[in-house]
């Protein structure tokens, strides 16, 4: 998996949280759709922190594995 960082993810607009995130906040991952370099991912608690940009194929594989419980506990 190849990723590259974006040092200040607050410079990008249009972040979205998972539909499974509750309104009370907590630990959330946000993603940004339609970025030319891939899929940026950041920690919602640190909006001015870094984001990692994954290829669309790598991100799709990760999401599919999570949905199908492909990670051992």
Image (tube, rainbow, N blue to C red):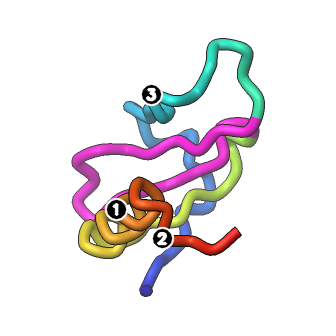
Check contact, mark 1 vs mark 2: CB within 8 A: yes
Q: Of the two numbered discs 2 and 3 on the same chain, state the one appearing first in sequence.
A: 3
The residue lying at 57 percent from left, 58 percent from top is: 51
Q: Which residue is mark 2?
A: 70
Secondary element type, mark 1: helix
Mark 2: few, some, or many residues within 10 Å (few <14, many ≥20)? few
Q: In the rendered image, which residue does mark 1 sit on? A: 64
Marks 1/3: CA distance? 15 Å
Q: In the figure, residue 46 lies in which quadrant?
A: top right
Q: Is residue 43 magenta?
A: yes
**Residue on which disc 3 sits:** 19
Density class for disc 3 (Cα within 10 Å; few <14, some 14-19, many ≥20) is few
> Is residue 49 magenta-colored?
no
Above or below for 73 versus 44: below
Depth check, mark 2 against mark 3: the one in front is 2
The magenta stretch spans which residues? 27-45
Position of 15 with respect to 56 (left or right) is right
Task: Report the front residue among 72 and 31.
Answer: 72
User: Of the residues tagged 1 and 3, which is closer to the observer?
Assistant: 1
Residue depicted at x 57% and y 40%: 10
| Alpha carbon separation for disc pair 1 and 2 | 8 Å
* Mark earlier in primary sequence (1, 3): 3
Residue at image location 43% in from the left, 86% down from the top = 1
> Measured along the vertical axis of the image, is residue 13 above or below residue 71?
above
Residue at (41, 67) in percent of width and height: 65
**x and y percentages locating residue 5 in the rendered image:** 55, 70
**Viewed as shown, does residue 68 lie left or right of 22?**
left
- What kind of element bears circle 3? loop
Please provide percent x and percent y for residue 48: 68, 43
Image position, residue 29 (x, y; %): 59, 44
Q: Which mark is residue 8?
A: none
Q: How far is disc 2 from disc 3 in space, using C-alphas?
A: 20 Å
């Amino acid at each position: 998996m190849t990723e590259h960082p974006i040092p200040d993810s607050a410079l990008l607009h249009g972040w979205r949280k998972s539909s499974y995130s509750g309104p009370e906040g907590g630990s959330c991952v946000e993603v940004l759709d339609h970025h030319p370099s891939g899929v940026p991912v950041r920690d919602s608690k640190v909006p001015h922190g870094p984001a990692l940009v994954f290829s669309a194929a790598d991100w799709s594989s990760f999401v599919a594995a999570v949905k199908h419980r492909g990670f051992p506990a």
